Image (spheres, grey):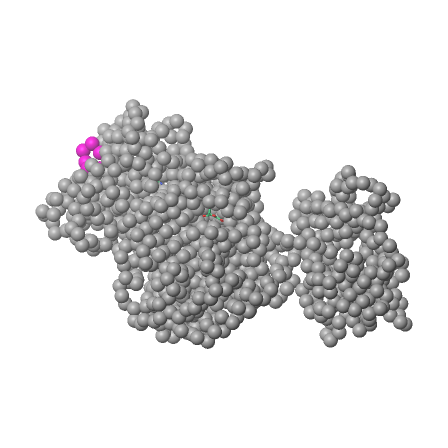
């Protein structure tokens, strides 16, 4: 559209772009409004000097002054060109849209002032001077309005108005009484404007007349055609590929969870990318660095590093290049070889997988990605790449639908195929690895509510001033994790949990350059089908929780009603128009496929729209990414100015959050997601970062925005919460009430502190209280809680009471009536054959009583223990196997020549009864070895519910 066309052109229009995010929608709107063949060129206003005016008048048939951020009074926003053009006495037709309209009003005696309330993304009915409907619907994006006094209306005639939310009215359309100049305050090119073609027709007719004259008198355009910011890349269309190669592949009918491959076969330090469609999606893709080469780029230093065996035969290298050259490099890497013979319908044959950071997007917009070289910035810019991609020579795909695995090799690597096949079969048959990483409640440090409310208000100030129409404000939470199992990958365990809590269509787990990244993104960024050349972007804007702040569940129907609100639709509409704009840079046929569709996720409802583009010949997936990155849903509109404002408001770079994750395969297919709802662990920080935010508009309620941010952050933070509860089991008897209550409370308190759980009844104001008073407070609270729960039970028998506390300090209880048991018959006691090599990993769950009791259950199962049968367990200590405890008791043994021994505290639960017996001198701590125990031996078993009873060791 903006490059020279083969067919002769009727009208040539020059569009002066004031850096808006809607300017590129204007050419399509003009084409749709007229039968004539219209060619548009878009030029950045900063490149236009008053001295170019004569040349423009000679070369074009009409000039459009675009919308834009800021005000016409600010020379940085408008520049000198537009006022000079309006002053010029030529009769070239001019159309001003929004900011352009305000420039016209200003030039002819009007004034531009703030509206009482900004109107962004609001659709209004246009009326004439008498209030009569004109039948046109107009989408408005403005904070400022033009006032025309008598002097001004002598030159400018008002053609239409719209009513504002406060009942006043604003001028919407004008025309110059003597010159071919028109202006519209609204955006006729918006997806929701209706029947606006008639408004631009007079301008186009005048331009057509002008073009006839130009054709008679002039040869045509004098200025060189404007090069759009994004250049055609020489993608797969132009056949410049140097080599051809067959893809080698294999399909295995094998049901497998590729996450288990990561957890069992990838070493903690290895780099890899794992993409998984958790919800409706179908495919999972696993790429290991071992079978890839890598490309990393840092925008701040402009350094590009390629490592590994490159597929274009060049040598690994490290060099300094501008961002533009990196896009070229990506193109040439993908286009070097033409691959064929891979399976149809399989989305990825091999190629790039990885991430782009948000700062890469800022750089793409021409902004300084790290304006403040603060300490945080240093960490990011110097240590972490902004593009990190693996070029997968080999990859493993899983198809959920046919339950089969695809092994793909671009290099016909038979030994890889064979080894991988064997490895997958082994993993598919092996038991799943239990999740053990996260044991302690994390310490979470989030932006304070006050800070956020303040930033929301500042955002709204910027909007009122006309600098932005919508700002996607975000803030990170930081979360420290204590892990107990060094052999397992915390990121993989987090992913495992996140997937079970919140499976989304764009799950991902990556480890690249020592960055760990775990994501459950619901939002598709850009997908491109190289065969049909259709690109789609599906921005989400508008979020409603599933549970309201008062605890009420919100139904889908209620959410739909809320998501129909003017505020939310406006929010979404703004980004739909912005997305159309971005795609219009590479396509002359952009359509909005879905507008305002409600999507239901695990914890929230969201409003999604889909914009699709038939990408023009000569452009490929990389060009589409270039023209549309960073994702508009994470910036607001207009994109560039909004990003600049957000850089001032937010403290520090966003990093991987707000960027993209996904793949571009060797055929040019691309599928990426907006990098949200994720946790990132940077190598130079000791915590995980969880970014979250939301779009702020003039209609936002700051407190609601804070709740929305919290909700989004929680959807990830939830995965960091321990899943076990701390547990106490105790006896209640009619005679003695709650037996050993103080002792149980003391032990519970210690365990809650160990796991960093919230103490029951802790309101956050407990800081400064002594431990003794915290314990006292918890104890009295839980005492009443248990007694209240006991009400209604038959009080003439004894009960075993289980009291458990979750990581948020919430208690729950269970009661079991205790049958009277004979203490005379000894119970059968088995010896666990297990060597106890995993003792260190389990230690916290042995030293503390929790609901994580799988290891006790497994030991019972191993020996086939029934009912009151007990199993004695062991731990490995160099070459010896030492007794620890039973599955529900502590144990003591009489070894000839020794006192009654009980295993040392390290290695068993510090049982209440055990402590008592030790205090009273009945027992002495000592080491008991496996070989000290023989079938037929008597042992003593005890716990606080049953006291002490006898057992006899039997052969397994
Ligand atoms: C900013 C986030 O989400 C973005 C903002 C949304 C909104 O404003 O409604 C919805 C989805 C995302 O595009 C986030 O999840 O952190
Ligand atoms: N869309 C626009 O061009 C907006 C113009 C101006 N910045 C305003 O807010 O009124």
Ligand 2's quadrant is top left
Would you say 305 lies left or right of 748 here? left
User: What main secondary structure does the magenta stretch of the protein show?
Assistant: loop
Report the number of discs: 0
Question: At which x and y percent is residue 518?
Answer: 52, 57
User: Which is more toward the observer, 833 or 137?
Assistant: 833
Q: Name the quarter where the C terminus is drawn.
A: bottom right
308 is higher (above) or lower (below) than 712 = below
Question: At which x and y percent is residue 936?
Answer: 84, 68
Q: Which residues are magenta?
A: 176-181
Question: At which x and y percent is residue 203?
Answer: 21, 39
User: Which is more toward the observer, 444 or 905?
Assistant: 905
Please check the rendered image and state whether residue 778 is part of the magenta-colored stretch, yes or no: no
Which residue occupies 73% across, 65% down? 863
Q: Residue furthest top?
A: 130
Q: Is residue 275 visible?
A: no
Q: Quadrant of residue 176?
A: top left
Would you say 602 lies left or right of 484 here? left
Which residue occupies 14% across, 41% down? 209
Question: At which x and y percent is residue 319?
Answer: 39, 69
Q: Is residue 489 visible?
A: yes
Which residue occupies 54% across, 42% down? 546
């Amino acid at each position: 559209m903006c490059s020279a066309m083969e067919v002769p052109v009727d009208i040539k229009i020059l569009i002066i772009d004031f850096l808006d995010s809607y300017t590129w929608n204007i050419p399509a709107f003009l084409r749709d409004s007229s039968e004539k063949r219209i060619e548009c060129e878009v030029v950045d206003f900063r490149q236009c000097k008053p001295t170019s005016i004569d040349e423009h008048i000679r070369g074009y048939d009409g000039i459009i002054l675009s919308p834009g951020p800021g005000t016409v009074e600010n020379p940085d926003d408008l520049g000198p060109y537009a006022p000079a053009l309006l002053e010029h006495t030529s009769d070239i037709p001019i159309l001003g849209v929004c900011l352009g309209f305000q420039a016209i009003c200003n030039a002819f005696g009007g004034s531009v002032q703030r509206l009482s309330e900004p109107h962004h993304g609001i659709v209004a009915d246009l009326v004439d001077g008498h209030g009569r409907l004109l039948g046109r619907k107009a989408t408005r994006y403005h904070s400022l309005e033009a006032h025309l006094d008598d002097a001004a209306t002598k030159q400018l005639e008002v053609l239409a108005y719209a009513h504002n939310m406060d009942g006043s009215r604003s001028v919407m359309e004008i025309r110059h009484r003597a010159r071919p100049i028109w202006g519209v305050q609204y955006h006729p090119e918006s997806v929701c404007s209706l029947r606006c073609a008639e408004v631009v027709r007079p301008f186009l007719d005048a331009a057509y007349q002008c073009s006839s004259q130009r054709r008679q008198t002039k040869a045509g355009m004098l200025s060189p055609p404007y090069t759009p910011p994004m250049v055609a890349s020489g993608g797969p269309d132009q056949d410049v590929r140097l080599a051809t190669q067959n893809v080698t592949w294999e399909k295995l009918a094998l049901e497998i969870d590729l996450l288990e491959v990561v957890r069992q076969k990838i070493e903690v330090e290895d780099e890899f990318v794992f993409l998984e469609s958790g919800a409706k999606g179908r495919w999972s893709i696993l790429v290991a660095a071992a079978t890839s080469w890598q490309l990393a780029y840092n925008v701040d230093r402009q350094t590009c590093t390629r490592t590994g065996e490159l597929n274009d035969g060049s040598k690994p290298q490290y060099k300094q290049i501008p961002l533009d050259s990196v896009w070229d490099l990506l193109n040439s890497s993908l286009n070097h070889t033409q691959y064929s013979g891979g399976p149809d319908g399989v989305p990825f044959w091999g190629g790039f997988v990885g991430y782009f950071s948000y700062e890469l997007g800022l750089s793409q917009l021409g902004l300084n990605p790290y304006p403040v070289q603060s300490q945080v910035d240093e960490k990011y810019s110097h240590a972490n790449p902004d593009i990190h991609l693996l070029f997968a020579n080999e990859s493993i795909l899983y198809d959920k639908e046919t339950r089969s695995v695809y092994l793909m090799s671009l290099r016909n690597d038979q030994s890889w195929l064979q080894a991988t096949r064997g490895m997958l079969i082994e993993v598919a048959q092996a038991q799943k690895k239990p999740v053990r990483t996260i044991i302690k409640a994390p310490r979470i440090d989030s932006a304070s509510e006050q800070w956020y409310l303040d930033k929301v208000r500042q955002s709204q100030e910027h909007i009122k001033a006309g600098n932005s129409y919508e700002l996607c404000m975000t803030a990170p939470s930081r979360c420290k994790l204590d892990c107990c199992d060094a052999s397992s990958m915390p990121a993989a365990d987090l992913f495992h949990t996140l997937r079970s809590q919140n499976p989304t269509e764009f799950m991902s787990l990556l480890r690249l350059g020592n960055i760990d990244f775990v994501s459950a993104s619901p939002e598709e960024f850009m997908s491109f089908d190289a065969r049909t050349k259709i690109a789609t972007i599906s921005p989400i804007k508008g979020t409603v929780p599933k549970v309201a702040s008062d605890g009420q569940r919100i139904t889908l129907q209620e959410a739909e009603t809320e998501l129909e609100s003017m505020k939310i639709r406006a929010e979404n509409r703004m980004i739909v128009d912005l997305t159309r704009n971005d795609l219009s840079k590479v396509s002359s046929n952009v359509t909005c496929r879905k507008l305002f569709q409600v999507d239901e996720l695990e914890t929230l409802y969201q409003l999604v729209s889909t914009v699709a583009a038939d990408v023009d010949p000569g452009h490929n997936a990389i060009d589409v990414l270039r023209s549309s990155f960073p994702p508009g849903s994470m910036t607001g509109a207009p994109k560039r100015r909004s990003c600049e404002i957000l850089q001032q408001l937010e403290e520090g770079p966003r990093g991987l959050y707000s960027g993209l994750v996904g793949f571009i395969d060797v055929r040019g297919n691309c599928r990426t997601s907006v990098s949200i709802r994720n946790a990132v662990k940077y190598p130079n920080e000791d915590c995980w970062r969880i970014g979250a935010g939301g779009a702020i508009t003039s209609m936002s309620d700051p407190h609601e925005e804070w709740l929305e941010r919290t909700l989004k952050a929680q959807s990830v933070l939830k995965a960091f919460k321990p899943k076990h509860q701390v547990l106490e089991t105790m006896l209640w008897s009619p005679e003695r009430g709650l037996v050993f209550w103080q002792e149980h409370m003391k032990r519970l308190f210690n365990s809650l502190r160990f796991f960093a759980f919230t103490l029951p009844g802790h309101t956050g104001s407990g800081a400064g209280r002594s431990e003794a008073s915290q314990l006292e407070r918890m104890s009295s609270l839980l005492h009443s809680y248990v007694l209240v729960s006991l009400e209604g039970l038959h009080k003439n028998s004894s009960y075993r009471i289980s009291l458990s506390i979750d990581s948020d300090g919430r208690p729950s209880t269970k009661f079991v009536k205790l049958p009277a048991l004979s203490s005379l018959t000894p119970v059968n006691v088995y010896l666990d054959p297990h060597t106890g090599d995993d003792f260190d990993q389990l230690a916290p769950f042995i030293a503390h009583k929790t609901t994580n009791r799988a290891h006790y259950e497994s030991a019972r199962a191993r020996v086939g223990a029934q009912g009151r049968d007990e199993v004695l367990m062991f731990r490995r200590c160099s070459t010896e196997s030492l007794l620890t405890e039973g599955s529900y008791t502590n144990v003591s043994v009489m070894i000839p020549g020794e006192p009654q021994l009980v295993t040392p505290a390290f290695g068993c639960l510090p049982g209440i009864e055990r402590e008592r017996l030790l205090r009273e001198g009945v027992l002495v701590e000592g080491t008991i070895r496996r070989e000290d125990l023989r079938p037929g031996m008597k042992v003593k078993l005890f716990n606080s519910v049953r006291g002490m009873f006898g057992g006899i060791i039997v052969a397994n």
